[in-house]
Amino acid sequence: MSVVVIETDDLERWIRETVAASVQTATTQDLPPSLRREEFMDLLGIGESKTAELFNRPDFPVIRDFGHPRVSTWR
């Protein structure tokens, strides 16, 4: 079993770069005001475990007001 160690700064940089690249392919007019979990996974091309990891980070902008977590697409 392999273990990968990622520094916090590297992970944050990777997240910012990945989100920025994904958003460049879709303008905000093409996106709804918020993305459901499945839409977010499809947009970024990531799986369930990475999505859960991101959604559970305290510094990740997840909206939980309506019962299901959503990610805002507003800047």
Image: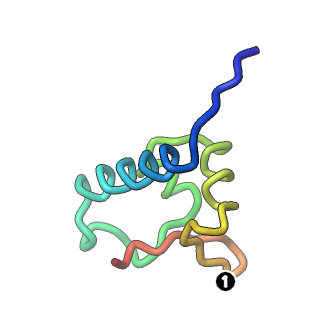
Q: Is residue 37 above or below residue 11?
A: below
Question: Quadrant of residue 14 in the image?
Answer: top left
Mark 1: few/some/many CA within 10 Å (<14, 14-19, 20+): few
* Above or below: residue 75 compared with residue 30: below
Instruction: Check disc 1 and report the residue beneath it.
Output: 66
Dot 1 amino acid type = Phe
Query: In the image, residue 20 lies at what x, y percent?
Result: 31, 56
The C terminus sits in image quarter: bottom left
> What percent of the width, then of the height, locates residue 21?
29, 50
Q: Quadrant of the N terminus?
A: top right
Could you say where residue 22 lies in the image, as x and y percent from the top left? 33, 52
Most foreground residue, 55 or 11? 11
- Name the residue located 67 percent from the left edge and 43 percent from the top edge: 49
Residue 23 on image: x %, y %: 30, 58
Residue farthest right in this picture? 1
Residue at disc 1, secondary structure: loop
Residue 58, quarter of the rendered image:
bottom right
